[in-house]
Amino acid sequence: MAEGGVAVIQYAVFVRGAEDVLVEFWEDFCQVGAVEVPRGDEGNVRISCELLTLYSSPCACYVLFFLLENSVYDSIGKEGSNILHGNVDRLGSYSECTSAQASSGNFSGQYCKFTIQQGKIEYTVAICVPSSCKKDDILMLEWLGIFTYKNKSFIAPSQILSFISANDTYRVKSVHCQNNTPYIDVFVGICIFVVALFITMMIAGSIYVTIKEWKSKGKMMEDDLSPPHKNYKTISVSKINGHQLQESSAKSQHQSSDHGVTEGKNNKVGFLEWMLTSFAIQKTVPAVLSTQITAGSYSAIHGIRVLSLLWIISGHVCHFTLLNNLDNPVQWLLSVPNNVLYIFSLGGPFYLAVDTFFLLSGLLSARTLLNMHHQPDQGLTKTVKDYVINRLQRILPLYIYTMCLFIGMCSLIPWKSLGENLKSHLEKCRRSWWTNLLFINNFILIDQQCMGWTWYLANDFQFHITTPIFIFLLFRNKVLMFALAGFLLMASFIVTALISWFFKLPIGLHIDARLLSHGEYNIQYYTKPYCRYGPFLIGIMLGILLHQKKTSLLTKTSVLTGWLCSLMTMAAVIALGYTLDDTVESYSAPPVLYQALHRTAWAAAVGWIILVCEEGHAGFVNTLLSSKLWIPVANLSYACFLIHPAVIDMYYGLQETLLHYTDINMFYLFLGHTVLAHIIGLALCILIENPMQALRKYF
């Protein structure tokens, strides 16, 4: 009778309405009273009419015939090929599932994924169920064995994995259903408001400046046509950074060079005018795309900054793709991490470009504070206070805006098969956004970070707080300053070595158990300031050296020796990262020493390049790195750093299938993500970074 009931459904689904099928099947099923469903090593499970009704009604009723729809069955995840290279996830078809509709129109398809554990291997299987089903219903129906067709379970264990893991049993760990209904609570609403507010201010400022320019030009033409009235009123065309036009009377033509407001005007009106002009694209676009070199800046760092950012983006494209979206991750792991020809893929052994950024940050922090220290009207306390406030004003506005944009994006975009990561990002941001604003997200709730890549900003701000100590000692006791620098470097080396030895941390990515627990590498070592301080401290010392020097520091012999040492150091850092044996079984002193020293050594080598460029001994290297063509792209580097991981996540969250690793595929992904990140970075600079920096000058 039970088989007859299923047969009734198989036939009737295609010729009659859903309600008739359910009524007929339910009567047939409940006359029998129960059926037995095989559950592998658990034996047969007896399913009664009352049990099914109690636990899963009305979901159970709908599932029993919904799964037999052609489009629904076709959308369910099925085992594919290339399993030995890691293609174990069965994603099915998201679009086909969600487009399925019950003939009665009562419900549609809902895309869900089971997380399955088979032996030591974990994978996902997509299932298409009625939209009326809840997670508890789906888990119960799986336990009851409902997700079958012709005696074959949709989530049956993989036969090939059974040979690999020597285990043909499985267990369902969890189920995730994709719900793309936007949910805007107070938290998300505030973020969307912030995003919309600055877009509105940009539009308003651009319109204001356009009208002002139009009126000014019209009045200038009037004056040209009416010579007798020239003394009655004049138009003074003044500019704020080359863009603001203002009207002033002949009696009050004196204009403040700092505030750009006409003397005698109400301060509130002056600030409003300044604010609107600051957000106008007529001002922000030329400022962002300017190739003007700031007086006293180090010209070579523009090229270094851009190249380092490209290296980081390339690493993130490869890394994020590996962890989230490859159908052949084993092939990637066998080909890329241990081959020096793929050095561009992960920033060297593991993101050496980040240490270059720490070096540049230390260099610029020392220069900034030294310039402020030489202002005669500033005491030490006020100098340090202004230094910290300036740093916060520099990084916080764009940081907050990008976080709001990211939260809004995670909330509103209809994600597809691989969108659960974006939903988890949203929940993490709900819990830990405040740690980002306090720059403590590298210590507190580190496994729940909002925008996990912003651990760098937490470290960077913590490092900046130490710079005043060295500048203070520079003018009090240089010996003590160098002693403190040496002590902190040694302490960082020792702490890093001990952590590496205790946790047996890998140098990069490895195809062993440490890959699955890569979070330990991040939590214990990669994001901690006491392990990453060396490059920043090298930058501080380099900044002090360049600021204090009166004459050339280098001779021809020292230049040649320095270049040789620098290039050999960089080559050694890269080569040893690929040759040292840091497997768990043979973990020893060499990888520990490498882990402790290699980032600081890399920063010192890059610091030498900056030094010789400033000294004029770098030849074509200085010509290349100091080119003005780098400057507009370098102006976008902070915005691109903040937004590019979100761009990569967004791309993968909108995918319905996994990607196949080939070199050309990864190259095209890198190009696409890089271009899109810079386009969005340009928009962010126009919307928020450049206007906020202009507003700082008003106060």
Image (spheres, helix red, strand yellow):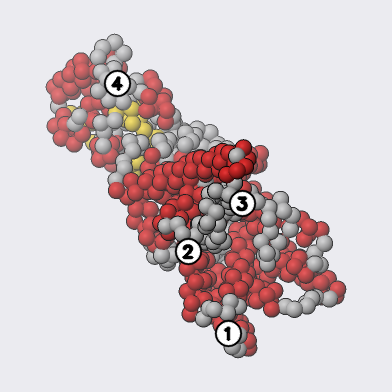
In front of the other: label 3 or label 1? 3
The quarter holding residue 4 reads: top left
Query: In this rendering, would 313 be left or right of 499?
Result: right
What amino acid is found at the position of numbered circle 4 in the picture?
Answer: Ala
Mark number, residue 242: 3
Residue wearing tag 4:
102
Quarter of the picture holding the N terminus: top left
* Disc 4 to disc 3, C-alpha distance: 63 Å
In front of the other: label 4 or label 2? 2
Labels 4 and 3: the sequence-earlier one: 4
**Contact flag, marks 3 and 1 (Cβ < 8 Å):** no
Mark number, residue 473: 1
The image position of residue 585, as x and y in percent, is 56, 64
> Residue farthest to the front?
228
What amino acid is found at the position of numbered circle 3 in the picture?
Answer: Gly
What amino acid is found at the position of numbered circle 1 in the picture?
Answer: Leu
The quarter holding residue 107 reads: top left
* Disc 3 to disc 1, C-alpha distance: 41 Å
* Disc 2 to disc 1, C-alpha distance: 31 Å
Residue wearing tag 2:
699
The image position of residue 339, as x and y in percent, is 68, 53
Query: In this rendering, would 607 be left or right of 263?
Result: right
